[in-house]
C-alpha cells in the first residue's frame, strides 16, 4: 500500500497459476493492481491463498512484456514490429502457401491451459473451421492426457470425481505421485487440516514429499517405490483387497459391468501381482503394501489424489485405470470423501481439455469421427469439418522432421522448454516455414518463430477458467490490455485473414456458443456465473445447480468398467553407463517453465534448478552440496548445482525445470504413454558426475 497507494476499486477474479483456481479480490488504483486479497466467498479457496497467487502477479507489467506484433522472414533475421493487420496478413499468407504446396494437413495449432476457455475455444475452432483439419492439441498432452483417457474408459468422463471440500469427509487419503503442499498449496493445506483431525494417510511416491512428515502430520505408510513401477504397486494393492475378500461386493454388483469385473479379478489374483512379487520390482516392503491395501479398503471413506507422478509415464493411462479399478472394487465412488481425483497442474488444464483441444474430440469429449456430432458443429459454424482425427503434439514434431508438417500456431505454450527431448523439438521447429507464437514474453520457442503475436496476462482477460474440481470461475479484466487487443480477438482476426470470419463482439458471446454446443455446459453463461460466483460442470437440465460430486447413482458411462492393467516395465533402463533414475517435479514458489514467476520476487526463493541426490550416491562421486554436476542421459547432457538430500532413495535423483538455462528437458526421453503420447518425464536413466564449471 505504501508503494502503490490506496486502492480506489476492487474486482473479483481467479488466480492464473495452479489448478486449485483460487478466487481473489484485486485491489486497484487507477490502472494498477495494489494488492491481491484471497476472496472469502471463493468456493475453491475459502479465503486462503499461496505465495504465487498472492504475490506473483507483477509479471503482467514486467519490462520484458512484448506488446506489439512482430514478424520476420527467417528465424535468423531481426524481429520487425508491425501493425496487427500486417501480422495477420503475413501469417495467413504463409499458412495458405504451405497448404497450397503441402496440403491442408500441413499446419495446425496448440492451445494453452493458461488461457481462458473462450480463448482456447477459438484456437481449436480456427484449426477446425479455418485450417480445415483436426491438428489441434493442448499442452495437457504433456501432463494429464492419461487422466482424460483412463477416467473416460472406466467411468465415462475425463474429469475428477469430487469437489475439494469432499476431502473433509475422507477417512483415508491416498496421495499418489502428487506433491500437494508445493504444487496445489491451498488444497494441500485443506488436506493437512483433515489429516490433523485424524484421517489416515498413504503416500505412494519415490520422493519423501513434505506430507510424509510435517509438523502434526505423518503418513501411516510411505511406499517409496522405484520410478516407473506405479502399475505394479496399484495391482498389488488390488491383489490384497480381492484375495482377502475386502472388496465391496454389493457396489461392484450394482454399479459395475460384472463380466469385466470377473476378468479383472482373475487377472489381479495372478501371483505376479502379489505383494511379494511386486515388492521385488518396486523396491518396497510387501508388508507395507498389504497394510496400505487393508487400510484403504477398510478404513472408511477412501479417496485417491494423484498428480503427474501417475500420468507422466509410459503406462500413465494404465495407472489411471488401475486407480479407478481400486476405487470401484472398494465402493469408493458417489459420495463426499471418496473418489479418484486428478490434481490438475495448470489453472485451466481442465478447461482446455473440455473445450475440444484434442485432435480426436470436439468439446465435451465427443469424437470428431462421429457424423452426428460433427454435423452439429458444421451447422452451427456454417462450414464442412474434417472427420479424421488430427496429429498430437509429438506427431506434429515427428511430421515436421519428415518435412510434411510446416506451420504451427502456438497459444501460450513454450514447447522448446517444457516438452521432452528438447533437441528433437528444436529441430522440428527449425524445419517449419511458419511458427507463430502468441505469448507474453519472447520465450524459448520464440527463437524459432516467424510471427510473434503478443498475448495478455490474466489481469487483462475477460473469460473463465475451470479448476481441478470442474469449477468454472470468472476471470475479469483488472487493467486495460497492454497490447490493444484481447487474445480471443487476435485469433478471430487471424481466422478472418484466413478466410473464415469469427464476428464475436465479446467473450460472453463465445461462452454462449460453448454452452450451445456442449451439453455439459448447457446451463453456463457469464450472467449465471456473475450471479452464482462459480459452477461445477455438468451444469444443464439434469444438474441445474452444477455437480460437486460425480457418479452418484450411476457412472457417466452407465456401469463402471474394470480394465485389466498389466504392468509393462518402461523401456528406459539403467545400466552401468546410466546407473541412476532422474525424476522431475516442481517447487512451491515457482511455476512450470517459470515465465511468470521468474519475473517476480518469488524468484529470489529459488533462482536456479538444483539436482537432489542421495548422500550415498553423492559420496560415491565425490559430490558436495553446491557443486556443479553434469547430468548425462542417452539424449543429452546438462549441468546443475547439486544438493545432497535424503528425500530421494539411493539410485534416484530429482530436479525441477523452472529455469531455461538448466536445460532439464535436454536429457528427458521421447518415450511416452502408450495410449496418449504423454511424455515419460518421470523416468530417465542418467549418470551424474562432477562438472568443471557451469
Ligand atoms: Fe493460485 Fe494455486 Fe496458489 Fe491458489 S493454490 S493462489 S490457485 S497458485
Image (cartoon, helix red, strand yellow):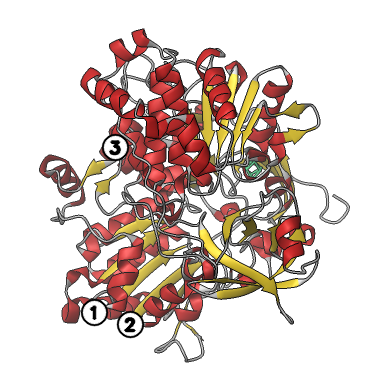
Which one is earlier in the sequence, the residue at label 3 or at label 1? 1
Tag 3's secondary structure? Answer: loop
Residue 485 horizontal/vertical position (percent): 48, 63
Circles 2 and 1: CB distance less than 8 Å?
yes
Rendered view: 228 above or below 60: above
What residue sits 29% from the left and 37% below the top?
A: 518
Towards the viewer: 150 or 383: 150
Rendered view: 597 above or below 364: below
Tag 2's secondary structure? Answer: loop
Q: Quadrant of residue 18?
A: top right
Residue 572 horizontal/vertical position (percent): 44, 60
As drawn, is 538 to the left or to the right of 412? left
Q: Is residue 158 visible?
A: no
The alpha-carbon separation of the residues under discs 2 and 1 comes to 8 Å
Towards the viewer: 231 or 588: 231
| Residue tagged 3 | 518
Q: Is residue 257 visible?
A: yes
Residue 162 horizontal/vertical position (percent): 48, 25
The alpha-carbon separation of the residues under discs 2 and 3 comes to 35 Å
Quadrant of ligand 1 in image: top right
The alpha-carbon separation of the residues under discs 3 and 1 comes to 32 Å
Q: Give the numbered dot on residue 98.
A: 1
Q: Nearer the viewer, mark 3 or mark 1?
A: 1
| Residue tagged 2 | 433
Amino acid at each position: 500500500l505504501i508503494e502503490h497507494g490506496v486502492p480506489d476499486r476492487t474486482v473479483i477474479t481467479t488466480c492464473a497459476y495452479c489448478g486449485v483456481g483460487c478466487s481473489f479480490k484485486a485491489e486497484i488504483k487507477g490502472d494498477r493492481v495494489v494488492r491481491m486479497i484471497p476472496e472469502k466467498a471463493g468456493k475453491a479457496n475459502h479465503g486462503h491463498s499461496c505465495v504465487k497467487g498472492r504475490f506473483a502477479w507483477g509479471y503482467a507489467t514486467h519490462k520484458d512484456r512484448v506488446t506489439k506484433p512482430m514478424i520476420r522472414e527467417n528465424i535468423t533475421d531481426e524481429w520487425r514490429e508491425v501493425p496487427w493487420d500486417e501480422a495477420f496478413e503475413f501469417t495467413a499468407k504463409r499458412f495458405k502457401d504451405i497448404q497450397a504446396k503441402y496440403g491442408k494437413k500441413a499446419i495446425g495449432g496448440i492451445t494453452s491451459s493458461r488461457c481462458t476457455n473462450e480463448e482456447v475455444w477459438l484456437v481449436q475452432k480456427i484449426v477446425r473451421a479455418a485450417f480445415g483439419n483436426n491438428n489441434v492439441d493442448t499442452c495437457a498432452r504433456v501432463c494429464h492426457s492419461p487422466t482424460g483417457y483412463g477416467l473416460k474408459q472406466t467411468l465415462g468422463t475425463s474429469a475428477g470425481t469430487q469437489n475439494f471440500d469432499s476431502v473433509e469427509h475422507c477417512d483415508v487419503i491416498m496421495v499418489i505421485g502428487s506433491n500437494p503442499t508445493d504444487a496445489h498449496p491451498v488444497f494441500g493445506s485443506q488436506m493437512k487440516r483433515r489429516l490433523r483431525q485424524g484421517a489416515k494417510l498413504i503416500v505412494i511416491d519415490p520422493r519423501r514429499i513434505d506430507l510424509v512428515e510435517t509438523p502434526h502430520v505423518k503418513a501411516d505408510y510411505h511406499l517409496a517405490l522405484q520410478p516407473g513401477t506405479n502399475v505394479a504397486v496399484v495391482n498389488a494393492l488390488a491383489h490384497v483387497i480381492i484375495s482377502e475378500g475386502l472388496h465391496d461386493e454389493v457396489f461392484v454388483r450394482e454399479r459395475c459391468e460384472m463380466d469385466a469385473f470377473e476378468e479383472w479379478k482373475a487377472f489381479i489374483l495372478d501371483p505376479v501381482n502379489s505383494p511379494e512379487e511386486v515388492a521385488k520390482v518396486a523396491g518396497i516392503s510387501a508388508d507395507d503394501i498389504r497394510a496400505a491395501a487393508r487400510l484403504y479398503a477398510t478404513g472408511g471413506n477412501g479417496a485417491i489424489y494423484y498428480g503427474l507422478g501417475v500420468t507422466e509415464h509410459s503406462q500413465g493411462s494404465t495407472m489411471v485405470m488401475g486407480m479407478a479399478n481400486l476405487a470401484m472394487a472398494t465402493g469408493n465412488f458417489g459420495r463426499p470423501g471418496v473418489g479418484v481425483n486428478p490434481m490438475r497442474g495448470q489453472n485451466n488444464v481442465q478447461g482446455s481439455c473440455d473445450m475440444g483441444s484434442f485432435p480426436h474430440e470436439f468439446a465435451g469429449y465427443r469424437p470428431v469421427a462421429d457424423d452426428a456430432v460433427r454435423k452439429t458443429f458444421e451447422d452451427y459454424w456454417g462450414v464442412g469439418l474434417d472427420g479424421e482425427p488430427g496429429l498430437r503434439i509429438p506427431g506434429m514434431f515427428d511430421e515436421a522432421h519428415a518435412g510434411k508438417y510446416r506451420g504451427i500456431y502456438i497459444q501460450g505454450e513454450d514447447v522448446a522448454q517444457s516438452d521432452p527431448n528438447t533437441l528433437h523439438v528444436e529441430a522440428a521447429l527449425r524445419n517449419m516455414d511458419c511458427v507463430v507464437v502468441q505469448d507474453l514474453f519472447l520465450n524459448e520457442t520464440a527463437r524459432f518463430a516467424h510471427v510473434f503475436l503478443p498475448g495478455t496476462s490474466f489481469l487483462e482477460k475477460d473469460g473463465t477458467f475451470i479448476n481441478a474440481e470442474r469449477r468454472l470461475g470468472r476471470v475479469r479484466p483488472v487493467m486495460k490490455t497492454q497490447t490493444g487487443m484481447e487474445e480471443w480477438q487476435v485469433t478471430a482476426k487471424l481466422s478472418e485473414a484466413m478466410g473464415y470470419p469469427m464476428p464475436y463482439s465479446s467473450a460472453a458471446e463465445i461462452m454462449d456458443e460453448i454452452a450451445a454446443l456442449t451439453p455439459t455446459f448447457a446451463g453456463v453463461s457469464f450472467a449465471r456465473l456473475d450471479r452464482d460466483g462459480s459452477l461445477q460442470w455438468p451444469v444443464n437440465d439434469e444438474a441445474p445447480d452444477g455437480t460437486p460430486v460425480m457418479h452418484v447413482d450411476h457412472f457417466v458411462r452407465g456401469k463402471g468398467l474394470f480394465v485389466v492393467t498389466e504392468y509393462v516395465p518402461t523401456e528406459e533402463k539403467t545400466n552401468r553407463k546410466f546407473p541412476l533414475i532422474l525424476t522431475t517435479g516442481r517447487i512451491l514458489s515457482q511455476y512450470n517453465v517459470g515465465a511468470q514467476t521468474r519475473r517476480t520476487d518469488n524468484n529470489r526463493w529459488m533462482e536456479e534448478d538444483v539436482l537432489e541426490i542421495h548422500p550415498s550416491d553423492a559420496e560415491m562421486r565425490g559430490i558436495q552440496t553446491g557443486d556443479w554436476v553434469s547430468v548425462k542421459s542417452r539424449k543429452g547432457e546438462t549441468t546443475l548445482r547439486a544438493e545432497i538430500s535424503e528425500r530421494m532413495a539411493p539410485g534416484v535423483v530429482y530436479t525441477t525445470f523452472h529455469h531455461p538455462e538448466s536445460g532439464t528437458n535436454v536429457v528427458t526421453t521421447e518415450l511416452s504413454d502408450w495410449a496418449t503420447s504423454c511424455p515419460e518425464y518421470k523416468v530417465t536413466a542418467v549418470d551424474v558426475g562432477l562438472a568443471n564449471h557451469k
